[in-house]
């Protein structure tokens, strides 16, 4: 950590603006990076972090604003030009070649040569020296792919920094690392910062922000929310900055009372989890109850949903349905048990775009029946017609390819897909994401109604006011672990925010 | 573009009729058909008869392409199965020879399917293995010679007839009916289209995407073995070097002419077979016209180019009315 701050910032971004098709992705954003500091860039989905990085590194052009490095205005057109100017970027997915050796990767495109022939020996010697600087003593002649993701990350950083970088941008480098690997990476980051390199650290893990970052810049909806010293910013304030909610805001009116906890659980999960995915958790789901999963982006909400549905196989713990132990090895297992799952990514995980609305609606039911018991065309028409009317899917044409429908109507068709299977547990991941206000209210109304019909519901949502409105119980996640459960009267936006922001010491059961 | 309904098939039917008309112009006796020895003969009948192997291949290929795959080994599988059938025909009863050939085709399909569905190898690479190795296997079976046979049972597939229709054409028709019944009579068709359209989403909806992928490659192997039997019966022998040579490309072309996209999804078996007939009609037309057969390849290439241009996203983007087809196709 620098003791004396230099007069002039290392990287200075002023009034950066970028629009996509009329939509402001960045709106007059300022960002200041000092030499030798580790600076967290935080924000929820769509806050503008990636756009900011891409504009600064020349991957995207900018509409307005200035970027200055060491007081000199720069305008790189490509990532290569940005690297030459001294801004290096390492993305979450390592962009190196796993089949080449470590040394070859380090020197790719700038191999030491003599008379046009690569000097393999010199290259390997130099590679060993560089990596020793990073605390890595590995065989540089071995293929990169043989090393762990953490080591590959460090090699990617070493390559980026060795290109005479002054600024290093790390875009979610820790997302796929375990706790020990994160420590190794942090050691490297500290070492680089002490050499005067300014590091921009993008992450979703707040604990990591407080462990390593000197300052924090928060973006929301393309605008700068604020820049703070980490030491003087309480977690609760940070979470409030990120989610944009005033804690004084009146608690959303709740329309129903909490269930009595006495009834037997429909499905229960004990010590359920997967290493480097979601820490083991206990969860019981009751019929007629809505359980909300709250937390910041990347906190393990979707991961939990995928584990419960068998889309990802748990390596810890056990699951039981109606008191009988069950195996959840695949979505097919889960569907057979009466589970349904509407994923967050409608386009990639939900719809089959070129099939019709009718075919999309009957797909899960048909898959459960098996191919030898086809639903007759009449049955299909009847099912599709019923749900199109029930959910008011527009246009009301079952033969239209679903890819042509609006997001809200696609979402309703996906709901119909699962309702057609007459599920007992429905998992909805961000059911209102990207949906206009009208459809929004309708989907919330549906959730309430389904629950009244005796369905067990698990809803993942970033919209705290929504969760508070429909959930009987809220499970709060932080850093890939279930950290708190709020029940009945205790469910409020304020309580959820404090649970998200709480440090481990305070975390625990928040039954008020 | 991608959302067009291939089942309509009007362009393919028009193209087929147009090519037939051109053939009639270059060779006025094109439509002359006579009935002789209980069988139909004539240039038009020839189009169907000669087109039979590619038509058989295109049935299996249509299913494979629907799952976003491709099977480059079908030509080699034809050679293997033809060699098996020819080597066993004179020494074993017909059912044994046929069963062994069909079994070999199923095994080849299973191999491809395992590589693609279980090991997750890219289809073009996975099937390239058998495309190269298959011809070697066929040569081992024939011991490097052209194996001829005289068994009339097997020869029937080349020269026989059913109600006046050449046996090869009847086999195509039977296989087409059987396959259509299998995929459209059950929910297999929907699941294959769902798998090809979006495998991730389909798996989350409970579709056994792996089993679907495995099944289509196995069926493709079976179709290839039938094609191999027909081709061997036609020349009453098995030529490991030339049987089915390059026919995998004709089969892919037939499926694409039939309106399917190599990105998977919607498929039509009938139009794939029609695509094979269009290709054969062009071949026959060029032979009849007296042009050197080399033109054949160039004409075929022009047709490929035309089909690809019609499917090209860049070209689709230029046509404003179809722009929606692009936006979600990107991924």
Image (cartoon, coloured by chain):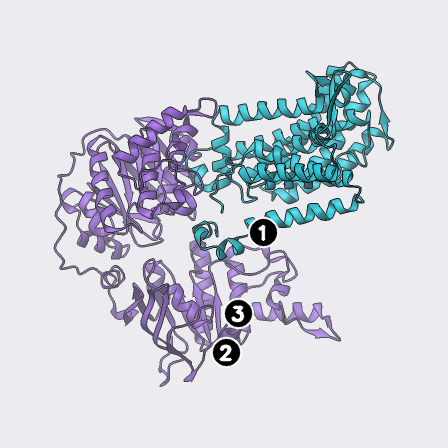
- Name chain A's colour: purple
* B254 to A74, vertically: above or below: above
Residue position marked by numbered label 1 in the rendering? B309
What chain is the cyan one? B
Q: Secondary structure at mark 1?
A: helix
**For the point 24% across and 64% down, which residue is it?**
A234
Q: Secondary structure at mark 2?
A: helix
Q: Residue at (53%, 55%) from the top-left corner?
A: B315
Name the foreground residue: A370 vs A319. A370
Q: Chain of mark 2?
A: A
Q: Relative to residue A191, is residue A70 depicted above or below? A: below
Q: Name, please, the residue furthest toward the top.
A: B93
Above or below, B97 against B138 in this view is above
Judge left or right: residue B190 versus residue A488. right
Residue at the disc numbered 3: A160
**Which chain is mark 3 on?**
A
Circle number at residue A85: 2
The residue under the point 70% across, 67% down is A120
Q: Secondary structure at mark 3?
A: helix
Which of these two is toward me, B3 or A109? B3
Label 1 marks a residue whose chain is B
Residue that lies at the very extreme toward the right in this rendered image: B145
Task: Tell me if residue B258 can be seen.
Answer: no
- Considering depth in this image, is B307 or B101 the residue closer to the camera? B307
Q: Residues within 10 Å of mark 3 (few under 14, many from 20)?
A: many
Q: Label 2, label 1: how many angstroms apart (C-alpha)?
A: 42 Å
Labels 1, 3: front one: 1
Q: Position of residue A307 (x, y in %)?
A: 39, 40
């Amino acid at each position: 950590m620098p003791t004396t701050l230099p007069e002039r910032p290392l990287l200075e971004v002023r009034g950066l603006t970028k629009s996509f098709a009329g939509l402001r992705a960045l709106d007059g954003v300022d960002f200041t990076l000092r030499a030798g500091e580790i600076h967290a860039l935080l924000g929820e989905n769509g806050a503008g972090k990636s756009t900011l990085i891409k504009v600064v590194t020349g991957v995207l052009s900018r509409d307005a604003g200035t970027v200055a490095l060491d007081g000199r205005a720069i305008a790189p057109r490509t990532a290569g030009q940005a690297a030459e100017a001294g801004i290096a970027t390492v993305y979450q997915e390592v962009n190196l070649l796993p089949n080449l050796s470590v040394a070859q990767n380090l020197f790719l495109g700038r191999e030491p040569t003599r008379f046009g022939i690569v000097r393999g020996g010199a290259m390997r010697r130099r590679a060993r020296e560089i990596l020793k600087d990073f605390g890595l003593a590995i065989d540089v002649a071995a293929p990169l792919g043989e090393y762990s993701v953490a080591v590959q990350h460090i090699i990617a950083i070493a390559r980026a920094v060795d290109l005479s970088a002054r600024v290093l941008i790390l875009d979610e480098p820790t997302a796929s690392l375990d706790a020990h690997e994160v420590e190794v990476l942090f050691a490297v980051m500290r070492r680089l910062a002490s050499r005067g390199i300014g590091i921009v650290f993008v992450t979703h893990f707040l604990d990591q922000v407080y462990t390593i970052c000197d300052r924090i810049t928060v973006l929301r909806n393309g605008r700068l929310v604020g820049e703070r010293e980490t030491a003087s910013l309480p977690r609760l304030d940070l979470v409030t900055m990120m989610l944009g909610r005033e804690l004084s805001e009146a608690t959303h009116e709740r329309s129903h009372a909490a269930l009595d906890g006495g009834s037997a659980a429909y499905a229960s999960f004990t010590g359920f989890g997967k290493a480097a995915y979601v820490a083991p958790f206990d969860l019981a789901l009751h019929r007629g109850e809505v359980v909300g999963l709250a937390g910041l982006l990347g906190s393990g909400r979707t991961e939990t949903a995928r584990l419960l549905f068998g889309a990802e196989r748990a390596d810890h713990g056990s699951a039981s349905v109606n008191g009988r132990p069950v195996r959840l090895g695949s979505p097919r297992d889960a569907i057979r048990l009466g589970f349904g799952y509407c994923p967050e990514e409608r386009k990639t995980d939900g719809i089959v775009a070129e099939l019709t609305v009718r075919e999309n609606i009957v797909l899960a039911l048909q898959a459960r029946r098996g191919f030898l018991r086809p639903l007759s065309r009449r049955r299909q028409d009847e099912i599709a017609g019923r749900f199109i009317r029930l959910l008011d899917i527009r246009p009301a044409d079952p033969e239209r390819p679903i890819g042509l429908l609006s997001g809200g109507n696609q979402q309703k068709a996906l709901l119909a897909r699962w309702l057609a299977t007459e599920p007992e547990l429905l998992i909805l991941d961000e059911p209102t994401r990207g949906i206009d206000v009208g459809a929004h209210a309708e989907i919330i109304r549906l959730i309430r109604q389904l629950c009244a019909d005796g369905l067990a519901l698990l809803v993942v949502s970033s919209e705290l006011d929504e969760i508070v409105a429909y959930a009987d119980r809220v499970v709060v996640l932080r850093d890939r672990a279930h950290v708190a459960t709020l029940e009945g009267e205790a469910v409020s936006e304020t309580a959820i925010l404090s649970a998200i922001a709480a440090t481990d010491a305070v975390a625990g059961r928040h039954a008020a | 573009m991608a959302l067009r309904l291939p089942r309509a098939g009007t362009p393919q039917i028009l193209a087929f009729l147009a090519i037939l008309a051109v053939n009639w112009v270059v060779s006025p006796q094109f439509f002359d058909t006579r009935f002789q020895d209980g069988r139909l003969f004539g240039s038009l009948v020839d189009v169907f008869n000669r087109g039979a192997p590619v038509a058989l291949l295109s049935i299996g290929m249509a299913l494979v392409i629907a799952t976003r795959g491709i099977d480059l080994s079908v030509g080699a599988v034809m050679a293997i199965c033809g060699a098996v059938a020819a080597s066993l025909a004179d020494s074993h009863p017909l059912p044994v020879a046929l069963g062994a050939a069909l079994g070999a085709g199923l095994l080849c399909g299973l191999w491809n399917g395992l590589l693609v569905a279980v090991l997750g190898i890219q289809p073009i690479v996975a099937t390239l293995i058998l495309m190269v190795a298959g011809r070697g296997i066929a040569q081992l079976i024939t011991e490097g010679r052209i194996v001829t046979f005289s068994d009339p049972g097997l020869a029937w597939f080349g020269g026989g007839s059913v109600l006046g229709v050449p046996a090869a054409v009847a086999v195509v028709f039977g296989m087409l009916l059987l396959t259509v019944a299998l995929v459209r009579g059950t929910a297999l068709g929907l699941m294959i289209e769902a798998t090809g359209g979006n495998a991730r989403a389909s798996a989350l909806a409970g579709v056994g995407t792996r089993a679907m992928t495995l099944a289509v490659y196995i069926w493709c192997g079976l179709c290839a073995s039938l094609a191999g039997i027909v081709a061997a019966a036609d020349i009453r022998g098995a030529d490991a070097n030339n049987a089915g040579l390059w026919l995998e490309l004709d089969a892919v072309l037939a499926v694409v002419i039939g309106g399917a996209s190599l990105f998977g999804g919607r498929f039509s078996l009938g139009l794939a077979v029609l695509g094979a007939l269009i290709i054969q009609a062009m071949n026959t037309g060029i032979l009849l016209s007296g042009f050197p057969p080399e033109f054949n390849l160039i004409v075929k290439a022009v047709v490929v180019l035309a089909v690809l241009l019609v499917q090209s996203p860049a070209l689709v983007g230029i046509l404003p009315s179809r722009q929606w087809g692009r936006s979600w196709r990107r991924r």
